[in-house]
Image (spheres, rainbow, N blue to C red):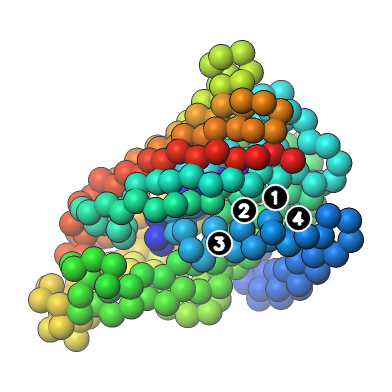
C-alpha cells in the first residue's frame, strides 16, 4: 500500500521499451478498468477506481509515504490474508509536504490511502497501473502506466514568472525482488504526453520489522531518484525568458542523480479490516538540481497520518 509523493515525484531499472510499453499499457488500462467496473461488486470497484484517480491527479504527495503494499505485509505474515481475488485498502489521511520540490514552505493536504490488487496479475496504486508479466520466486517484472504531476507557478511566490508545467501520462517499467524482510525495487518512467517532462528513475530498498507482535510493523529503507537532462531543465532550469520574468538567474542543469533519501512508515492493524499508518520521507537534493535558483532548500521532508479499511 502506497501513500504520497512530492508534486513531481516520483518513485526503476529494466524498463519496458517505450514503444512497446505505451501500447501495452493503454490496452491494459482499458481492459482492466472494464473488468473493474462490471460483474459482482461493480459499484464498490468503481468507487475504488475513482479514489485511485484522486491519488494520481489530486494528491501529488500520495506516492511518497505509501511505500509498502498490503501484499508485502501479508507475505511476511504481518497482515490479515487476502480473501478472494481482490485485495484492497481504501482510506484517507493528511500530510504536510513542501509546496513544490525544493521549496522552503509547507502545505497541509488531505490524502487518499489507496491500493488495489487483483490476484498476482496487476495492481493499481501510487506507482501507477502495473502488470506482473514475470512473477517468479520473489522476482517481479512488468510495465507501468502512471500519471505525472504538474506544477503551477501560483503554487509559491518563488515560482512566479516561470510558467506552469503540465501534468502528463507516463509509461515505463519496474523490477522488484523480495527476500525475507527485504524488498528491492527499481523503476523507470518516461512522460508520454508533454514529453518535455523527461525521464525519471528510482532505486529503493525496504526492510520490514514487526515491533509489537505482528500488529505494528515498521518499514524503512533508502531511496535514490534519478532524472535525465530534459527533466532537470523543465523542473529546475531557468531559460532567459523565464529569468527576465522571474528575476532568477538563467540556469541549465544536466541530468543524473536527483536526490538521496530515507522513507519510513509505521502500520498498525487495529482489527482484521482497519489499519492506521504514519509515514515519513526525508530526501536531500543533490547535483545540478540542488544548485538551481529555483531550489530554496535542499533538504525536503514529508510526514503524515491516515487510516484505511482493508477488504
Residue 204 in view, yes or no = no
Q: Do the residues labelled 3 and 4 touch (CB within 8 Å)?
A: no
Mark 2 nearby-residue class (10 Å; few <14, some 14–19, many ≥20): many
Q: Residue furthest top?
A: 213
Which residue lies at the image location 62% right of the left edge and 71% below the top edge? 18
Asked whether, in this view, residue 223 is left or right of residue 237, the answer is right
Residue 172, image x, y percentages: 60, 64
Badge nearest the viewer, 4 or 1: 4
Residue receiving disc 4: 44
Q: Which mark is residue 125?
A: 2
| On screen, residue 89 above or below 234 | above
| On screen, residue 157 above or below 140 | below
Q: Do the residues labelled 2 and 1 touch (CB within 8 Å)?
A: yes
Among the 4 quarters of the image, the one containing residue 36: bottom right
- Quarter containing the C terminus: top right
Which residue lies at the image location 80% right of the left edge and 68% below the top edge? 34
Residue 118, image x, y percentages: 79, 50
3D distance between C-alphas at marks 2 and 1: 6 Å
3D distance between C-alphas at marks 3 and 4: 16 Å
3D distance between C-alphas at marks 3 and 2: 11 Å
Residue receiving disc 3: 54
Amino acid at each position: 500500500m502506497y501513500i504520497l509523493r512530492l508534486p513531481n515525484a516520483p518513485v526503476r531499472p529494466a524498463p519496458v521499451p517505450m514503444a512497446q510499453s505505451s501500447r501495452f499499457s493503454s490496452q491494459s488500462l482499458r481492459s482492466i478498468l472494464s473488468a473493474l467496473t462490471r460483474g459482482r461488486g461493480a459499484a464498490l470497484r468503481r468507487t475504488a477506481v475513482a479514489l485511485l484517480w484522486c491519488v494520481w491527479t489530486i494528491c501529488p504527495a500520495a506516492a511518497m509515504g505509501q511505500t509498502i503494499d498490503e501484499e508485502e505485509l501479508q507475505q511476511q505474515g504481518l497482515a490479515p490474508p487476502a480473501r478472494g481475488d481482490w485485495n484492497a485498502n481504501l482510506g484517507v489521511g493528511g500530510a504536510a509536504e513542501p509546496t513544490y520540490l525544493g521549496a522552503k514552505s509547507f502545505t497541509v493536504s488531505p490524502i487518499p490511502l489507496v491500493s488495489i490488487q487483483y490476484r498476482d496479475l496487476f495492481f493499481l496504486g501510487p506507482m501507477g497501473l502495473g502488470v506482473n508479466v514475470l512473477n517468479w520466486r520473489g522476482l517481479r517484472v512488468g510495465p507501468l502506466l502512471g500519471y505525472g504531476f504538474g506544477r503551477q507557478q501560483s503554487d509559491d511566490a518563488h515560482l512566479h514568472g516561470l510558467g506552469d508545467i503540465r501534468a502528463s501520462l507516463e509509461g515505463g517499467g519496474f523490477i522488484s525482488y523480495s527476500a525475507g524482510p527485504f524488498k528491492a525495487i527499481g523503476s523507470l518512467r518516461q512522460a508520454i504526453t508533454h514529453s518535455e517532462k523527461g525521464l525519471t528513475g528510482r532505486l529503493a530498498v525496504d526492510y520490514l520489522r514487526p515491533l509489537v507482535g505482528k500488529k505494528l510493523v515498521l518499514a524503512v529503507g533508502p531511496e535514490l531518484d534519478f532524472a535525465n537532462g530534459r527533466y532537470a531543465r523543465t523542473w529546475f532550469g531557468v531559460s532567459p525568458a523565464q529569468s527576465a520574468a522571474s528575476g532568477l538567474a538563467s540556469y541549465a542543469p544536466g541530468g543524473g542523480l536527483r536526490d538521496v533519501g530515507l522513507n519510513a512508515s509505521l502500520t498498525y492493524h487495529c482489527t482484521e479490516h482497519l489499519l492506521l499508518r504514519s509515514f515519513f520521507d526525508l530526501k536531500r537534493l543533490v547535483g545540478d538540481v540542488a544548485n538551481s535558483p529555483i531550489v530554496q532548500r535542499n533538504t525536503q521532508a514529508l510526514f503524515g497520518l491516515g487510516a484505511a479499511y482493508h477488504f
